[in-house]
Image (tube, coloured by chain):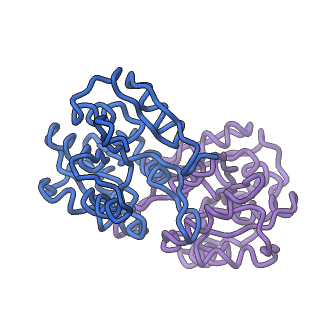
Chain colours: A blue, B purple
Amino acid sequence: RIKASGLKLQLCTNETQATREDFVRKLRGLGFDISVSEVTAPAPAACHLLRERGLRPHLLVHHDLVPEFAEIDKTNPNCVVLGDAAENFTYANLNEAFRLLIGMEKPVLISLGKGRYYKETDGLKLDVGAYMKALEYACDVQAEVVGKPAKSFFESALAELGVPPEQAVMIGDDIVSDVGGAQQCGMRALQVRTGKYR
Amino acid sequence: RIKASGLKLQLCTNETQATREDFVRKLRGLGFDISVSEVTAPAPAACHLLRERGLRPHLLVHHDLVPEFAEIDKTNPNCVVLGDAAENFTYANLNEAFRLLIGMEKPVLISLGKGRYYKETDGLKLDVGAYMKALEYACDVQAEVVGKPAKSFFESALAELGVPPEQAVMIGDDIVSDVGGAQQCGMRALQVRTGKYR
């Protein structure tokens, strides 16, 4: 409907358990006509930041997200990229990421979001934000958050659209990540009362 | 030497990977004449607090610490007790503790310390404080810390000795947990430059 009206569309998701390709495939399966270039997601935003600053990440992310970082040099890491690693959040993997961070002259922790928890069919799960807090505390660092509600995240979506913030509207179900983040960026925002709204 | 001089002695440890019995056995093996009643440790302090407030804990602690809680009713938990669970810090166990906490009308999180990390022969490990921060953030609660540097911890050691704070001296290698905690309690404190001092 939005597309048919001639309006430009960019999807902003904090999905970090799958590549954009997988995400788009899922949406197309649900009947939405969407392509990869119309999706703004934390992993590509992180790749952009890594390239810009010459950072080589150690990844603590979901298995299915790893392909997003295929082109990035990961040898001799000088930062840690943290996503919702789910089953990869093992005691050994957390200690490994911690040891790398604390061993850096200036620890750099990049987090693909800062959600507290989310719901799956088998119940609530700790989200990436909780693990981010654990590493922040242990290493006495502040993580750089990529993804909603980071201003840079919305700016990259706007750049993709080629539209200034005052001509864009953000639609989302999360008052902080979606509405708050977009407003801080100079966009107008609409909150829908579906999804996780309550 | 201290004992031979006629001075009363109480060991204050934040050890939560073993029962006091195991801890004393290890020290005796090293040649120290010490008994279980001369050890103040976080787990018994937690048990005291649980009993006092009628709390039934879900335990996320090290396997070897579980016997300390043998006498405590653990059915239908209304709080979570967090220790340095080490290998028990699995994704599943963390989610379980989180779900119980977030499901409580008023989540109560009791942490057996708040250390950031410690060193083992195979390298640095995240300590209980990091996992405490993760659960605090996810559930928007503040943990109650039992163990050093909590004032109540030093007070229970003094009670064990039957000595007022101004007649006691704390000796330790940690400026915050040992020296700071004791001073806040009205004791004098000596910092030794051994152990983890650097």
Q: B89 or B28, which lies in front?
A: B89
| Rendering coords of residue B21 (x, y %) | 67, 77
Left or right: where does residue A13 sit relative to residue A55? right
| Rendering coords of residue A120 (x, y %) | 53, 65
Q: Residue at x 56, y 66 (%)?
A: B95
- Is residue A3 depicted above or below B104 in this figure? above
Q: Residue at x 37, y 48 (%)?
A: A13
Would you identify the image quadrant in which residue A26 lies? bottom left
Q: Residue at x 72, y 54 (%)?
A: B107
| Rendering coords of residue A191 (x, y %) | 53, 36
- Is residue A157 depicted above or below B100 in this figure? above
Q: In which quadrant will I find the N terminus of chain A?
A: top left
Would you identify the image quadrant in which residue B128 lies? bottom right
Q: B31 or A111, which lies in front?
A: A111
The mark total stands at 0
Q: Residue at x 22, y 36 (%)?
A: A160
| Rendering coords of residue A48 (x, y %) | 19, 42
- Is residue A65 depicted above or below A7 in this figure? below
